[in-house]
Each structure stands twice: as structure tokens, then as C-alpha cells.
Amino acid sequence: MKTFGLPDHLLSEYTSGTLDADFEVLVASHLAISTKSHENFRFHQEIAGALFAGLPAGATQPSSSSSTHLFETFSKALVELETATHSVNAANGLPQILVDYLETLKGVKSLSELNWIACYEGIERVVLTEGANGVRARILKCQPGAIFPNHGHGSEEVSLVLQGAYTDAGAHYVRGDVQCISADEQHSPVIDDNEICFVLVVSELPAIILDKSKVL
Amino acid sequence: MPRGVQPSRDSSRDRRQLGDADKTAAHSAALERLRDTQDRLAFEELYVYFAPRLIVFFERRGLEPRRSQEIMQDVMAKIWEKAPLFDASKASAPTWIFTLARNQLIDVIRKEKRSEIDYTDPALKPHEPASPDQALQSKERELALQKAIASLPEDQAVVLTGIYIDGMKQAALADKLGIPLNTIKSRLRLALNKIRTSMEVGQ
């Protein structure tokens, strides 16, 4: 359960570019607000680069005039330096990629503009994406001291702390930290009592609440 | 290798791959020349090596040959545009170009699927001049990486290629190879651990 950086399976698929958009946003958001996975991410990119450079050339050959043609085109182009988007939004401190994602999905640029819906005592949520089996990505807004009802998951669940902090199974998770909960684990996180906590949570299958009396 | 030490069974594969670290250094140097002086020959050198491999990469990701050809050209355009951001101490030329190719591929797929998320990578941040120490470290790191990949058992190498090059999910790879998902997971874990260990030792 205790995880602060990203596990290899997420980093390898992120490097490869094959994660679904919601998981991808979580990974990129983590890289924007935490340095805990930077070294490992570089490691995965290096492996991909080495495998790529080692590919044999294939049957389809580039046409020989292309390089010259491309060169003529580019030498006239002005170079604009882009800002990296593993970046943080200056206005609200959120990962820029998450702000872009919220804008795409919900038409808003900050957490305060979202329509929060109460789900447990002291905990509200906004669903970002749904799959065939139910909720996949959501953001949770947790009041100081709130306690999640004990719950399990039909599949691995990955959480990223966007603001605030919580404790779960003896580990303390702060802004930028990742927690992976496998399909067979149950947990009941407790929010720190001095600050509101926002968490981005993504899983292929929705959470399974064991104590139904806590559901609002 | 000291005299009298038996070469390992894999030494021929090691030798075949070992030249690649030099090649990688040469590609990185070409990209630096392109960055610093818009050197046309440097671009040509990168084109000759990477254009065919970009096409192979996009074809292996399921794109038609003609489409792969087009997107290769887009990536070569990005290499030209973004060369000012290249920093050899942060990423080698192949790693940097792979990242551009991966981002281009995501753009293509997203455009087809409507939603668009634009972002770049830490590998694409503006460069600061590297110290000679860093350059040496990068070269040694690359050498250790190449060596470690070359000496992986075939069943682990297949998993790495499936994930990073063919862009397969672990479950799809398990189906394709006809082995359990857990075997894929453990082969990935073993492979990454081996490469990590060799790179730590190599530094």
C-alpha cells in the first residue's frame, strides 16, 4: 500500500504513451508537483530510447528528398520555446495538465468551480470519467479530520494528493505523494485535522464500500 | 577483460550492442550541432538514422506505412523546432527523439478521439551547458544501459520491447505470448531490476 512515487508499471506505460487519459493525467500531475519519481521516470525513458535506437530499419524507407525538403522548410521557421507542461498552474497551484483536463471535461479551471457532491460525512466528490463498469477518475474534497468508511476495490486504485494530507495504514501522504492500493486491499484513510485535502483518484473499477451505512 | 577469464555465453550479443553507446554519443553530438549552429549535415545525419526507425516505430504502433511516413516527417520537424531545448546531460538523442515520437503519437490518437491534452516533458526543458563531468557520466550511463539491455535473457527483452516499442498493455502482451499476466509482471520487474543494478554499478 505505502507508495510515494509511481510504480514501474505506470511509469513504463506512461513512457510508452499507452496509458488511458485519466491515468496519464494522474501520472503527469504527480511529475509536476513532486520530484519523487523524476529519477525513475528518466530511467524508463532511457530504456525506451535505447530500445528505439536499437530498432532495425524496416521495409518502408523514407523518400530520399525528404531531408532536404524538411530542412528548407524549417530553416525559415521561428523557434518558440514552449514551457514544459509538467508544470504547475501559477494561479491555483494545481498541475497544469490537470487544469487542462478539468477544462476539457468540465469547462472549469479550478477546483472551487466544480460541482461537489457529498458522498460520505466530510467528503465530497466530483466524477471526472466513467468506464463501462462505473466511476474511474474522481477528485475527492475532504474536510479536516474526515474518515473514509472502510472500502475495497475491484481493481488497483491509484491516488495522488493534490493538497493537504492524510494517514492510511500508518503511512502519511502529503501533496504530490502517490498511493497504490491493490485489488485485494481494504483501507480507511484519515484526513489530517488542520487542512482540507484534495485527492485525485483513478481506478479501472469503482470502489466497493463495505460499510454501507456511511454512504450519504 | 583480464586474460584467462572465460567470456560469458552472451558475449557475442554484448559485443554487437556495445558499439551503440558510441553511436548514441555521436547522435547526441549531432543534435547539439543542430541546436548550436543549425548544422544541415547534422540534421541529415539524424535523418538518415532516425527517419527509418521512426517509421518502424509508428508501424509497430499500428499506423499505415503512408501515415507512418507522414508522422515521421512531423517528428523530424519537431526535432528541428525543439533542438534548442536539447540537453545531452538530461537525455540522450534517442531518448529525446523517442519522447517526441511518443508525444506526436499521442497527439495523433487524441485528435482522432477528439479530446486534446497538450504537454511536453522534463526532457524538453531548455538546456544549460553541461560540464565535462556530466558528459562523461552520460556516456558511461549509456554504456551501462546498453550493456544491461543486451545481456537480458530473451524472454525479458521481449517484454520490454512489447511495452516500450510496441506499446502493448501487459495483459495484451500476456495474451499475445500465451503466458500468464503474472509472468509478464515478474519478467518486467526482473528486467528493470537488472538494468537498475548494472547502471548503479556502472556509475
Image: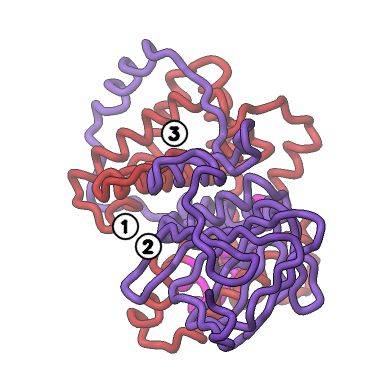
Chain letter for the red colouring in the rendering: B
Give SS at disc 1: loop
Residue occupied by mark 2: B166
Q: Residues within 10 Å of mark 3 (few under 14, many from 20)?
A: many
The quarter of the displayed image where residue B180 is located: bottom left
Disc 2 residue type? Asp
- Residues B51 and B174: in front is B174
Q: Position of residue B126 (x, y in %)?
A: 62, 27
Residue A194 appears in view: yes
Q: Dominant secondary structure of the magenta stretch?
A: helix
Tag count in the figure? 3
What residue lies at 37% left-to-right and 28% top-to-bottom? B77
Q: Residues within 10 Å of mark 2 (few under 14, many from 20)?
A: some
Residue occupied by mark 1: B61
Marked residue nearer the N-terminal end (3 or 2): 3
Q: Is residue B146 magenta?
A: yes
Name the chain under label 1: B
- Side (left or right) of B95 relative to A59: right
Q: Is residue B37 above or below residue B114?
A: above
What residue lies at 33% left-to-right and 44% top-to-bottom? B52
Instruction: Look at discs 1 and 3 and give the one toward the viewer.
Output: 1
Alpha-carbon span between mark 3 and mark 2: 22 Å
What residue range appears in magenta? B142-160
Give chain A's shade. Answer: purple
Instruction: Look at discs 3 and 2 and give the one toward the viewer.
Output: 2
Q: Is residue B182 above or below residue B98?
A: below
Name the chain under label 2: B
